[in-house]
Amino acid sequence: MHVVFGRSAGWLAALALGVGLLAWTVAPAQADWTTYRADGLRSGVDSSSVGSLPFASAWSTQNLGGAIWGQPLVHAGLVIVATESDQVVALSEATGQVVWRASAGTPVPSSGSGPHPPCGDISPTVGITSTPVIDPATNRVFVVADTLTGSTIEHKLFAFNVADGSAVAGFPVSVEPPGDVPADELQRPGLALDQGQIIIGYGGNDGDCGNYHGWLVSISESGSSEHTFEVDASGSQGAIWSSGNAPPVDSAGNVWTSTGNGNSSSFDYQESVLRLDPSMNLLDHWAPSTWQSLDSGDVDLGSSAPLLLPDGLVFQIGKQGEGYLLSASGLGGTGGTPLQQASVCGGSWGGAVYDNGIIYVTCSTGLRALALNAAAHTFTPVSGWQVTTAINGPPMVAGGLVWATDWNNGALYGLNPQTGQPVVHQSTPSMEHFTTPSASDGKLFLATGDTVEAYTIANPAPVAGGPAPPPAAATCTLRVRTRRVKIHHPKRRRHQKHAPPAFGTIGVSVKCDLAARVSLSGTVAERVSRKGKHAKPRTRTVRLTRVSAPMKAGIARTLQLRISLSLLHALEHHIRETGSFSLTAVSTGGTTRATARARLKL
């Protein structure tokens, strides 16, 4: 079936603040997507979605305040994204509602009179470009942000607790490579996690301007002991960027990456496939015999990351569109003969994934499918594969389909894995370069510029031993600290003719058993005097300004509700009013409401 979708004055009674459960809950995450392409091997295969359901939109967010260039991550019932405005945002996996938001400093303007990159294609600011990484063992998410402090540009590693978005002590830390020019470096590849180390790749901005180098940086999850590897140290360039892909990590903990063109006449690991240990010691490498011509033509081998295959094989493809099959146990060095070399397409930006004997390859002229014969060390085009040339995004596999985007024109495709024919064609908001979806629990998640779209594609996989219990929703208690309204008389400022009007506040103590973001709002219903002996009393309702705040587990906090001047006058004349106030608490387990009651007086 081919499915095509479009975008689609009286007396004071009491203040009531109620407890009730809202209509959304968070489903248990059965197979999280905690790093670029799901896991350290960059398999890009979602195992938590089985069978298939009619494709449908699940939810979409409002503008999140900045462009999203990385892949959405999924963990503990949350979808986590990072923006070019240096914001990290956690959404409910079930509804898309914002659960928490954390700041990673001030982003760098992409142009202007102040410090900014000398070129590039990210605007109006450069902030968090790469896909973050989550460590499920510590329940922390790590991001690298391009930051501006005064006139200083610096790349910093931030760590946040997934539960509530609070900053981890000891962070941020600088992860600037030694001796580099920060404005000239772009931290484009997704972050990797390897034996307690965060792996960070650097290259240049779009346009190859300035004096940048390719770097791979390793730093511990505690933010200490930085190790580095530099490409083309005697010259410049040699970017590690992979069109956003993260460095694969094999079962032995070795880190794999590929590099772009350098500008020195001597070989210094540009245009190469590299294997390193977690401390950034080089273990092995391979570069084609044509590395010099690739250099001179800006034909990066490293526009895609290496793909680790069964039986100790490695697949690499770059801007030239030439596919190489290598042996992981011995790459071959500079100019070594690969196990196989064959033209695949006109160029690849984003690399490939492997599933059920087929390598699905990103190509500028449409996704390609290659049948792997591991025993014979060969790959061949899949017979009968036909795909529209517009599908140029990095692929992934979920719900029995191969998913890829046309990020140039705003479209998502779900393809038959044997033929390439579209089963789903969904128009979307505009996307950034090399956008690729993620998936978990029967849903697909797609960054669309400064928003996120979610789609239902399959059933969640059953959990052995029965379904896991859903995360608990936070339980919050409220207590009005005092019945007396505190009066505030703001002072007149220099530019003001008169002082602002007086207002009142009442303090409400809030305490939640789990980390949550709470919102306190309410109305006051004022019973107005009757006109005439037999007239019915009239009621006038005044809404109070909503107050929002993050709450830490088990720690009480007093929130101040603002009382308007008209309500103060009513209290001043001993007029009674009835208030109805509600506190909404949003946590990873869902949303709850709480109430409290009190009589107010001046």
Image: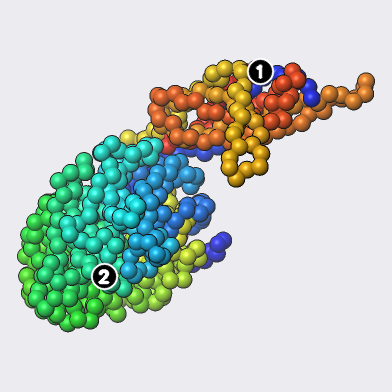
To which residue does mark 2 refer?
210
The front one of 291 and 167 is 167
* Residue 416 circle label: none
The answer to whether 77 appears left or right of 428 in the picture is: left
Quadrant location of the C terminus in the rendered image: top right
- Residue 194 vertical position relative to residue 326 in the rendered view, above or below: above
Q: Which mark is first along the chain, 1 or 2?
A: 2
Label 1 is placed on what type of residue? Lys
Q: How is the image coloured?
A: rainbow
- Residue 529 vertical position relative to residue 365 in the rendered view, above or below: above
Q: Residues within 10 Å of mark 1 (few under 14, many from 20)?
A: some
The answer to whether 301 appears left or right of 105 in the picture is: left
> Image point 7% across, 59% down: which residue?
283
Question: x%, y% of residue 222?
Answer: 21, 41
> Image point 43% across, 58% down: which residue?
67
> Image point 60% across, 45% down: which residue?
495
Question: x%, y% of residue 261?
Answer: 20, 74
Are the residues flagged by discs 2 and 1 in contact, CB closer than 8 Å?
no
To which residue does mark 1 refer?
601
**Quadrant of residue 179 in the image?**
bottom left
Q: Farthest residue in the front direction?
A: 494
The front one of 560 and 445 is 560
Q: Residues within 10 Å of mark 2 (few under 14, many from 20)?
A: some
Mark 2 → mark 1, Cα distance in angstroms: 66 Å
> Image point 46% across, 57% down: which residue?
450
